[in-house]
Image (cartoon, rainbow, N blue to C red):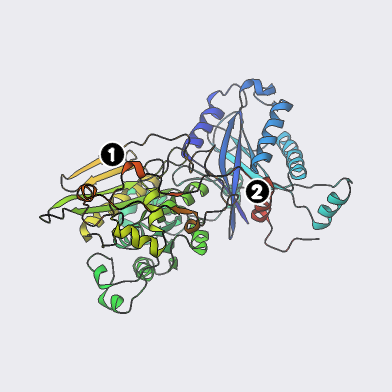
């Protein structure tokens, strides 16, 4: 089993400033983490960051740190109350490309791991050491046999704990940035991976390191229509070789004006869109790994596959799927790219009133699609309404199931913009833009700024699900939606709401008629502990 750790761009910058800001003494910080279990990897997800000031220590020097007991007790209590994994970070003097845990670190951390395993039912404990040029990281795991657990429950007889340190394979910080700890670098002595001559021209521009990063990415795309299909082609030609593709739909004749690689035969045979996208990938990389799921994003199998990705792309045409993807990205700290396009035709005169698109890459830990207003919870609820309710909503003018206009080259412009931003995340060659709007009628590309929301019920560390991973179940969105049918529109509202194929915007006073009950409840400590044990369980059956 591989062990990794992920934290947001903002958390990584905050930690670096604190740990390396004052080099006269060792510095310390603590992160409290959720957990994500994948087939061959367990990932710690940083949720809380605790920066420790000088008055938190009994002793603090260039070679030693000792926390005050009351500060240590506070950290243990907070980790226990929220069911999170404690990971301690501290700095060592010096720089260069090498740093190592000291014998003092070894003794202290082994004792700390045993104590936490005893007090918190086998919870692991992590540690990271940094200097100005390198870092090392490990996860202490204490396995407790069934018989030892039974003895602990039956009588207060002492149990011997023997924590074992496992090197972290990588620390993922921010947008697709990956650092390899020193211990793992020593273990990974294999030569550089082969780069296919297919990518020679872009290697000449951006280098081999960029190409290897692209080759190592695992990308999940939800929605394989016009923009999703174009995104798959762009990223496959940039070098992405591992994919999770999710879409429930099949090819129809009306798709052929814009769906990359789709043919008349595909439409006649009602071929799944995910299969067409898989063919697109393999035209570039025949041995690419592609998991194609003909399902929607609410499907549990699709969610399990998507949470193992390094990057998620929301290329869907509805709010409900974007709500689900936004939650998944925030809860599992996976960078998310949202893209969409709109063509609005005035009902009178058939004049094109709007041709615009957008690309958004939420700054995880600061803002998400929900607090930026990019997803509409009311519209999402209406989309998940029962057929009878949806028929009434359609009759009353609040939803319109008429297919929206779509043109291949317009969708392609937005997909190309999104691919360029992903390229820039992997290898920065210009300033990063997190929210771009493309106005095709005025030939303008407008960057927008989003004000972070401290109380967002999805992405805030205090009230949301940021970094909880498997410790909090993903909602059943169809059950979570609550739809209250609005009254029929008045004639004046119907006239003002003409949108040429788009769902009509509801009046402001009716904002709460369809909502998701998705706010994170107070943690159930026993349930969190059970989920933690399941995430950290060994592959083999539990030993006696």
Look at the image and tell me in which quarter the C terminus lies: bottom right
User: Does residue 283 appear to the left or right of 404 in the view shown?
Assistant: right
Vertical relation: 184 (above or below) 40: above
N-terminal label among 2 and 1: 1
Name the spot of residue 543 as percent of width and height, x first.
77, 61
Look at the image and tell me in which quarter the N terminus lies: bottom right
Vertical relation: 471 (above or below) 391: above
Q: Give 37 or 17, whichever is nearer the viewer.
A: 37
One can see residue 429 in this view: no
Name the spot of residue 233 as percent of width and height, x first.
32, 61
Direction left: furthest residue:
349
Name the spot of residue 105 as percent of width and height, x first.
70, 35
The residue carrying mark 2 is: 528
Q: SS at mark 2?
A: helix
Q: Give 178 or 252, whichever is nearer the viewer.
A: 252
Q: Around disc 1, counting alpha carbons within 10 Å, would you say few (fewer than 14), some (14 to 19), or many (20 or more)? A: some
CA gap between label 2 and label 1 equals: 40 Å
């Amino acid at each position: 089993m591989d062990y990794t750790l992920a934290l947001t761009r903002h958390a990584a910058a905050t930690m670096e400033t604190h740990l390396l800001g004052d080099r006269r003494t060792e510095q310390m910080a603590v992160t409290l983490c959720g957990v994500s279990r994948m087939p061959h990897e367990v990932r710690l997800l940083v949720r809380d960051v605790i920066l420790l000031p000088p008055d938190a220590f009994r002793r603090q020097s260039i070679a030693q740190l000792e926390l005050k007991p009351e500060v240590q007790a506070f950290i243990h209590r907070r980790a226990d109350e929220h069911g999170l994994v404690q990971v301690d970070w501290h700095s060592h003097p010096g720089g260069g490309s090498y740093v190592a845990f000291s014998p003092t670190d070894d003794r202290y951390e082994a004792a700390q791991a045993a104590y936490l395993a005893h007090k918190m039912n086998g919870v692991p404990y992590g540690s990271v050491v940094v200097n100005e040029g390198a870092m090392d990281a490990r996860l202490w795991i204490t396995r407790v046999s069934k018989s030892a657990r039974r003895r602990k429950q039956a009588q207060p007889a002492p149990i011997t704990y023997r924590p074992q340190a496992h090197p972290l394979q990588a620390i993922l910080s921010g947008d697709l940035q990956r650092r390899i700890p020193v211990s793992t670098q020593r273990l990974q002595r294999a030569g550089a991976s082969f780069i296919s001559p297919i990518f020679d021209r872009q290697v000449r521009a951006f280098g081999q390191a960029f190409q290897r990063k692209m080759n190592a990415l695992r990308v999940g795309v939800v929605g394989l229509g016009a923009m999703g299909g174009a995104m798959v082609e762009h990223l496959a030609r940039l070098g992405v070789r591992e994919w999770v593709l999710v879409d429930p739909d099949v090819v129809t004749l009306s798709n052929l004006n814009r769906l990359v690689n789709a043919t008349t035969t595909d439409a006649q045979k009602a071929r799944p869109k995910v299969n067409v996208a898989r063919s697109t990938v393999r035209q570039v990389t025949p041995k690419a790994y592609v998991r194609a799921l003909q399902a929607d994003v609410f499907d549990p199998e699709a969610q399990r596959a998507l949470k193992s990705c390094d990057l998620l792309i929301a290329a869907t045409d509805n709010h409900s799927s974007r709500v689900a993807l936004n939650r998944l990205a925030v809860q599992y700290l996976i960078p998310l790219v949202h893209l969409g396009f709109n063509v609005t035709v005035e009902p009178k005169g058939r004049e094109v009133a709007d041709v615009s698109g957008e690309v958004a890459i939420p700054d995880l830990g600061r803002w998400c699609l929900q607090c930026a207003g990019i997803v509409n919870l009311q519209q999402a609820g209406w989309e998940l309404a029962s057929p009878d309710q949806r028929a009434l909503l359609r009759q009353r003018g609040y939803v319109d199931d008429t297919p929206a206009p779509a043109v291949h080259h317009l969708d392609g412009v937005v997909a190309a913009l999104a691919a360029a931003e992903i390229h820039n995340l992997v290898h920065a060659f210009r300033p990063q833009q997190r929210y771009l709007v493309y106005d095709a009628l005025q030939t303008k590309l407008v960057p927008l700024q989003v004000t972070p929301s401290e109380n967002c019920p999805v992405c805030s560390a205090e009230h949301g699900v940021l970094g909880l991973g498997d410790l909090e179940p993903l909602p059943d969105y169809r059950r979570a939606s609550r739809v209250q049918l609005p009254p029929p529109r008045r004639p004046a509202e119907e006239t003002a709401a003409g949108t040429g194929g788009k769902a009509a915007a509801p009046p402001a006073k009716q904002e709460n008629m369809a909502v998701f009950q998705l706010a994170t409840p107070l943690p159930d400590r026993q349930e969190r502990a059970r989920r933690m044990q399941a995430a950290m369980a060994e592959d083999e059956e539990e030993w006696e």
